[in-house]
Image (cartoon, rainbow, N blue to C red):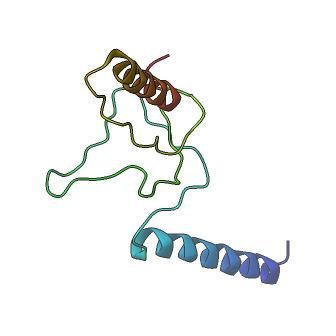
């Protein structure tokens, strides 16, 4: 490759690197277009002040343990003092836990 082309390629590479660094250093968030993988024994630590959230809107889908992500489950009515409403509430709780991936 002629030196002029090499210089132009290096300039393009530097501009790309500069843009990536600006996203990392000057942005208020990180955008990932690939999976994030943690090595064994690594943890996610959060501060103890106001707390942190995963999923910031009802329509955002999340899940655990490899199940298909779902939106937030709807409200579950508090059971009245009869067996039928108690069973309905327990079944709704079980469904929500299973859909999210907490239980199989």
Up the image or down, 32 lies above or below 15; here it is above
Q: As drawn, is 76 to the left or to the right of 49?
A: right
Image coordinates of residue 84 in percent, x first then y, are 39, 19
Q: Nearer the viewer, residue 46 or 96?
A: 96
Residue at position x 54%, y 46% in the image: 61
- Classify the position of the N terminus by image quarter: bottom right
Up the image or down, 26 lies above or below 52; here it is below
Q: Nearer the viewer, residue 28 or 59?
A: 59
Residue at position x 44%, y 28% in the image: 92
Image coordinates of residue 48 in percent, x first then y, are 14, 50
- The image quadrant of residue 27 is bottom left
Image coordinates of residue 65 in percent, x first then y, are 49, 26
Q: As drawn, is 7 to the left or to the right of 89?
A: right
Return the residue found at the far front. Answer: 82
Image coordinates of residue 103 in percent, x first then y, are 44, 19
Instruction: Count numbered badges in the picture.
Output: 0
Up the image or down, 80 lies above or below 58; here it is above
Up the image or down, 12 lies above or below 93; here it is below
């Amino acid at each position: 490759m002629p030196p002029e082309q090499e210089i132009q390629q290096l300039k393009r590479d530097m501009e790309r690197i500069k843009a990536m660094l600006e996203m990392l250093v000057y942005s208020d968030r990180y955008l990932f277009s690939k999976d994030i993988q943690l090595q064994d024994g690594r943890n996610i630590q959060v501060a103890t002040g106001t707390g942190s959230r995963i999923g910031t809107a009802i329509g955002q889908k999340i899940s655990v343990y490899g199940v298909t992500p779902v939106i937030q489950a709807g409200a579950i009515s508090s059971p009245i003092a009869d067996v039928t409403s108690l069973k309905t509430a327990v079944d709704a709780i079980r469904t929500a836990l299973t859909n999210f991936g907490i239980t199989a």
